Image: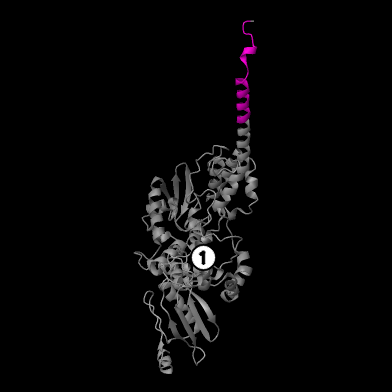
Amino acid sequence: MDNYLAKLYKNGEVYKEEEFGKIEIKPWQIFTEKQHLRDTMRDYCIQNRFSIVVQKANNKIYTVLCSDQRCPWRLHGSVLADGVSWAIKSITGDHTCLGLQTRNPMVSAKWAQRVLLEDIRAHNDIPGKALNKLLFERYGVTLPKSTIHRMKSEALVEIHGGFDVSYSYLPRYCEVSIDKACNEIWPTVDRRYCCKHLSVNFKGVFPRPKMWQLFWLAANATSDFIFGKAMKQMEKVKAGARVWLSHLGEQSRWSKHQFNPAFKCDVNNTNFVESFNATLGTDRARPVMTLLEGIRRVSMVRMATRRESCEKWDRQDICPNIVKRVKFLCKESRLCLAYKSSAGEYEIVDGKSTLPVSLNNHTCTCNAWQLTGVPCKHGMRAILDANLDPHRFVHEWHSWPETQAPEIGPPAFRRGVGRPTKNRKRGEEEQRKGKRSKTIKCGICGQFGHNKLTCQRAPTRKQKKGKEKKAEGAATTSKKGKKKAQNVDCSTYNFNQ
């Protein structure tokens, strides 16, 4: 293109892009279009610390003057014969103005967006202060804080698209299998409640620490015996607790002893979901397509990373975390006593409890082995007594079979009212990041967790002013009373009577 223009206009010179600080303009420099000429003039003005005003501009002519009325500098350009290219025809006068410092009217939000777009693309969450620092270090200029944030918002829209554009792409992004999963499969699968969130609601109705302990004893009970014992104690401490729990529906949604053993999972909280939610970072505040792409990318990288780590395992039978769990259970089983009744059948004594264990069926009366697929400490005691490898009794779901990775579709998403939050929402029992300790006691209301400066019951400004006026009025009346007492003539009184 540059050679073509040079041959077409032999008297001119095609403008070559230069880095900031080396930009030069001269007559008969040829530009690809009018916007190219305007952008180059803006960069040149910012580089040399002066500004210009447009004297005349249309589809054929572009004439600008120095903004200082005492400066004779003038530039004139016009469109060339092809109707697209532009050229500088003349530059008259020399700059006699003193120049501008860090604030230049030529530095606009659109210009800053153009020169900082790649920096924002590389780091979407870069603060405005850092952007202003980049402008000063590279170009010697700064922008107001409000302009910087407006520029950054426009740049993010250009990079990721707006919320309206993002939602318009959702039909193409969604897969047909999602409808089938939500309408046909989802209603038939088993569901579990998060006991961590459930316990917060339970604690609000039954705030005693003993009730809190009994709730978790019932939730983590793997056998009917332990669950029933916990529920009886709960009813003795506070009547109505069992009724409250019965309103939750089936016990298989929150208590381990009723979980389906076919899943080999006894998890009754959503900690893994909270951990995954924390990895989304700034994508949570982006348009829906950017959020979904962020989730897909995080999942893709995590699966690939874990697959690579799996290939480095020393043993290929079970996962490393399960290996650690097996070692821990081996140590825990030392206090148990094993009594063999027949081939593969044992009685295990654990304290005051006697539990039958079957190595043939991979079962234990405590039900923990059936729920997790990993031998419990009672089953581990029987396995060690039989001199067998504990890894052989771990369910195949805890190994790494050769399977095809599932396709991941976008989750349901609804943008809430107000400014999108970037941090994960913490529960009531979690420690707030950057917050002070809950042991702080307020001097006004006597409650814990805040001080008198942040107390909601503290008097407002109007109330404080009213109290101050009352205090001033009381002080002035007391002073007047003292003055009257001092002005009383003591000679009128006869103290000898």
**Hey, which quadrant is residue 21 in on the image?**
bottom left
Q: Position of residue 65 (x, y in %)?
A: 48, 77
Front-lying residue, 288 or 320:
288
Left or right of 492, for residue 130? left
Q: Residue at x 48, y 51 (%)?
A: 433
Q: Amino acid at mark 1?
A: Thr
Answer yes or no: is residue 490 visible. yes
Task: Spot the residue most to the front.
Answer: 70
Q: Is residue 382 left or right of residue 162?
A: left
Towards the viewer: 100 or 451: 100
Q: Residue at x 61, y 66 (%)?
A: 186
Q: Which residues are magenta?
A: 475-496
The residue that mark 1 highlights is 147
As drawn, is 487 to the left or to the right of 430?
right
What is the secondary structure assignment of the residue under circle 1? Answer: helix
Q: Quadrant of residue 473?
A: top right
Across and down, in percent, residue 55 comes to: 53, 79
Asked if residue 228 lies in the magenta stretch, the reply is no
Instruction: Single out the residue that lies furthest toward the left.
Output: 314
